[in-house]
Image (tube, grey):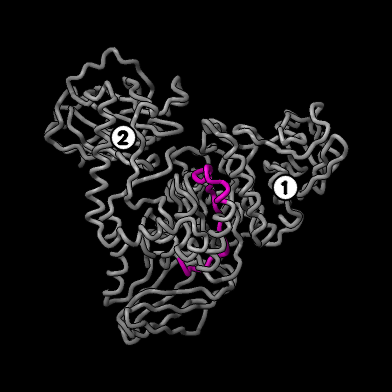
Amino acid sequence: MNLQRFIPMMILIIAANCCAHDVESAGKLKLPAVISDNMVLQQQSDVALWGWANPKAVIEITTSWSESKVTAKADVKGKWRTTIATPVAGGPYKISIRVKGADAGIVLQNILIGEVWICSGQSNMEWNFDLGVLNGDQELREANYPQIRLFHTRRDIAVSPNQDCVGRWQECNPNSVRYFSAVAYFFGRNLHKELNVPIGLINSSWGGTVAETWVSEEGLRPLKDFDERLDFLKLTAKNPESADRKNKAVLDRYWDKINSVDPWNQAFKSDYDHSDWPEMAVPGLWNSKSLANFDGVIWFRRDIELPTSWAGQNLVLELGAIDDMDSTWLNGVKVGGYETIGHYLTKRVYTVPASVVRSGKNVLAVRVVDTGGGGGFFSPAEIMRIRPANAPETQAIPLAGNWHYKVGPSTSQMPPLPPINEINQNDPTTLFNGMISPLIPFHIKGAIWYQGESNRMRYMQYQKLFPALIEDWRNQWAIGEFPFYWVQIAPFNYQGDKGEEAELRDSQRLTLKTPATGMAVTMDIATPNNIHPPNKQEVGRRLALWALAKNYKRGNIEYSGPLYREMKVEGSSIRLYFDHAGDGLATGPEGLDHFEIADSSGKFFPAKAVIDNDTLVVSSDKVKSPTAVRYAWGTIDEGTLFNKSGLPASSFSTQNGGASDLH
């Protein structure tokens, strides 16, 4: 998957500022989206409530669990904020909020008191049931948990902190959870079943994003690594129209260059003959077929027979998600396309003008450009369809099946992606501003995080960036060192990887030095040819183990796999010591593998590892004076070392160090 996306500058600036403008000029009582019906409030806490009203207005708040009335006064811009004390877990409750002297106000209904967690990161956190989860159909049917509440923050990019976001609290059921984060849901379900209290989950994630986009300016400035780009964001915000025109011209030149190297660049035309093209089953990523390692352009075409009654009507064309970019034509007329990167999770829904539609044979052509990883169509077959705009989905004609295809230029033949200066979701601070800031100061218990793939090539920077993100969120919420748990990235076959993947995992391991943190290891549940492992259940469970043991004091729970602590040289061997190996170490079904040992020159050789109670002895016939050990350092090295609780060890290199206080 490519890890960037470009958005027109002018639209971004409008989006960044419209909420603040509307709020400040509002004459009536208004609440942020995250404070609404069906929400969960953190139990036994002083939780923040805030909103907007007329300047200097007095706000009165009453709750159905208390006889006390709380008041707040709006400032000169109409912003007000206060706190209310919450009881132990329970509900449902009501909260009444009104302007003093007004006849009516806002009554929030169906509120629960329980445990609230924010869930963020890139695509593995964003990944939902509709995109593919292990035993997903059964899990969806059984996802009826009215005491689990879900808030999904809509994607938004902003150059300055937004005051509000788009989203709403919903009770957990098969419909509401279908497009929610699967990892977050399974994490929350584990907590709910074990604690028997309401759980609130706030999903604020975006696939393919880098860590620095989720950090505030205040959090990034001390690092000094992003100052130039942060300064650029401020400067270009002053003249978005000029930047938009400039970047559009750059994109146009990029596509002109692709057309110049694409021998099939006329395949969009309706009279183009594709009868001799081979066929491919659609949907399905082509890397799971015969084109396993191809990145570049592939054209897809198919004929569609449309009823006579459809002629002269606007149609809705749905193609599902396409990795990465697409340009789409019907009968030679362009009807849609996502021609900037970062949209591989975006479902393609295009309106076909009535003037394009014919009765009988129609020709659909799609040029797909994959810039890395899997490529092609990858939504469920049933959502690939076409229908009249005013007709129900039951009348749609399915589009899944065999399509003709032709391989175009590879990425090595294509021009490089242009260095566009448009603000995008991978710019530092833009998603903090758009998708995190509007949630603050909604009181949370803690955070779970699944991200890192997009920072893989900058693993050394991640060693300071990731802890800075955690510290920044804690500073922004100002509720203390709340727990922050993350998922270590899984083994994946990155083409051309020279150890960066393992180094990024080790950067995540070393972040455990940050207080009140924890890491769910996924070395054993990876899918080396799929960057999105479908077993989200186990990921959620392992995150929940940390919370249950550390924050909810559930005793006798082992919550982590073995974590390398220290080593001792013993002759020609090295003995390794681990945290979370108190009951002894264990192997997987294939035995111990993926260990290497370094000689005095620092060169690594394959090694043999033997378990000795809670330690590991590593050696090689080729190494007489060992200096270091590393484990699972290859891109697709899956876990073979566990503790007696069945939790896998993190990959590690003794050269990067260990710490006895990791947890």
Please name the residue shown 43% across and 64% down the image: 437
Image coords of residue 208 (percent x, y)? 45, 44
Above or below, comparing residue 332 to residue 211 in the picture: above
User: For this view, does 659 lie left or right of residue 165?
Assistant: right
Extreme residue toward the top, this view: 276
Which label belongs to residue 326? 2
> Which one is nearer the viewer's eye here, 542 or 61?
542
Q: Amino acid at mark 1?
A: Leu
**Range of the magenta residues?**
440-462
Say if residue 171 shows up in the picture. no
Q: Is residue 611 above or below residue 261?
A: below
Q: Secondary structure at mark 1?
A: strand
Vertical arrangement, residue 175 with respect to residue 301, above or below: below
Q: Position of residue 586 (x, y in %)?
A: 78, 38
Q: Is residue 226 visible?
A: yes
Q: Is residue 331 magenta?
A: no
Q: Is residue 450 magenta?
A: yes
For label 2, the SS is: strand
Q: Nearer the viewer, residue 373 or 176?
A: 373
Expressed as whole percent of the image width and height from the top left, the position of residue 283 reads: 39, 29
Quarter of the figure that contains the N terminus: top left
| Position of the C terminus by quadrant | bottom right
